[in-house]
Amino acid sequence: MKLDDILKRELDSIDHDHLGSSSENPLRDDAFDLSDEEKINIIEGKVHDILETLGMDLTDDSLKGTPLRVAKMYVNEVFGGLNPKHKPISSTFKNKFKYGEMLVEKNITLYSTCEHHLLPIIGFAHVAYVSNGTVVGLSKINRIVNYYAKRPQVQERLTIQVVKELQKVLNTDDVACVIDAKHLCVNSRGINDVASATVTAEFGGKFKDSKFRRDFLDYIKLETEI
Ligand SMILES: [Zn+2]
C-alpha cells in the first residue's frame, strides 16, 4: 500500500476518542519529587526483583550489573524526556532569507518506547513548517522529536506533541508531522508481524489544506542518498 493510502486510512480511522482527551503524558503531580539518583536506586531494586522472580542468578557476572544498568538507562536515556529539565532550548532566528515555502526535515530517526508493553518503537519522523517570520535551527527539530520520544509513549500522542511544541516555538499553526514507525510489541511478540508499521499524522494550519498536505507528502517521498 502506498504511503498516501496508508495515511488516508489512518486519518479516517483516528477519531478524537481514540486520541484520548489530552496530548499530555499521564504524569502524576509528584513525578519529580524524587531526585534522579533516588529513582535510579529504587528502580535498580525493582529490576533486581523482576529478574530474581524469574529465577535468574543475580550473582552471575553477566547479570549482576543489569539492574543498575537498566535503572540508569530508564531515568537518563529512554525515559529521560519525561523530565522538563531535559527539554531542548529552541533558539529561533529571524527568517532573513525571506524563504516563504515550507521547510521539511525528513527521516528524523525516532526511538521511542510503547507505554503498553515498554518495548521499542523505531522509525522516522518527518516534520514540516512554513515560517511566518521565525525560523529554528534544523537540529532543534530533531531534538524536539527526540525529547518527546524519550518517554513511555503512544505514537498518536507523540505526533501531536511534536506539532504543538513547534507551533509554540515558531509562533505559527503551520506545522505538520508524520511518523512512520515499527512497534516491537507488534513485530517481535503477540501477533509477531514483522512487516507492519504504523503511520500517524498531525497537520496544523495551512497543512489542513489538501494542496499543502500533498506537497509535504511528496517531499517526504523523495529519496535522499548521500
Ligand atoms: Zn505496545
Image (cartoon, helix red, strand yellow):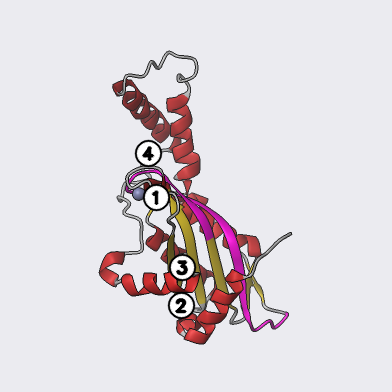
Residue underneath mark 3: 1
Callout 3 amino acid: Met
Which of the labelled discs sits on residue 34, or is there none? 4
Q: Can residue 21 be seen at all in this image of the molecule?
A: no
User: In whole angstroms, how far apart are the C-alphas of marks 4 and 1?
Assistant: 39 Å
Instruction: Name which quarter of the figure residue 18 lies in.
Output: bottom left
Instruction: Name which quarter of the figure residue 20 lies in.
Output: bottom left
Callout 4 amino acid: Leu
Contact, mark 1 vs mark 2 (Cβ under 8 Å): no
Contact, mark 4 vs mark 1 (Cβ under 8 Å): no
User: In whole angstroms, how far apart are the C-alphas of marks 1 and 3?
Assistant: 16 Å
Q: Earlier in the sequence, mark 2 or mark 3?
A: 3
Residue 104 covered by magenta stretch: yes
Residue 129 pos. (x, y %): 56, 75
> Crowding near pointer 2: few (<14 within 10 Å), some, many (20+)?
many
Residue 105 covered by magenta stretch: yes
Residue underneath mark 1: 193
Q: Is the C-beta of the residue carrying label 1 under 8 Å from the nearest atom of ligand 1? A: no
Q: Nearer the viewer, residue 160 or 123?
A: 123
> Crowding near pointer 3: few (<14 within 10 Å), some, many (20+)?
few
Q: Residue at x 40, y 17 (%)?
A: 58
User: In whole angstroms, how far apart are the C-alphas of marks 2 and 3?
Assistant: 25 Å
Q: Can residue 15 be seen at all in this image of the molecule?
A: yes
Contact, mark 2 vs mark 4 (Cβ under 8 Å): no
In this view, the mark in front (1 or 2) = 1
Callout 2 amino acid: Gly
Specify the segment rendered in magenta.
97-124
Q: Earlier in the sequence, mark 2 or mark 4?
A: 4
Q: Nearer the viewer, residue 104 or 151?
A: 104
Which of the labelled discs sits on residue 204, or is there none? 2
Q: Residue at x 25, y 68 (%)?
A: 17
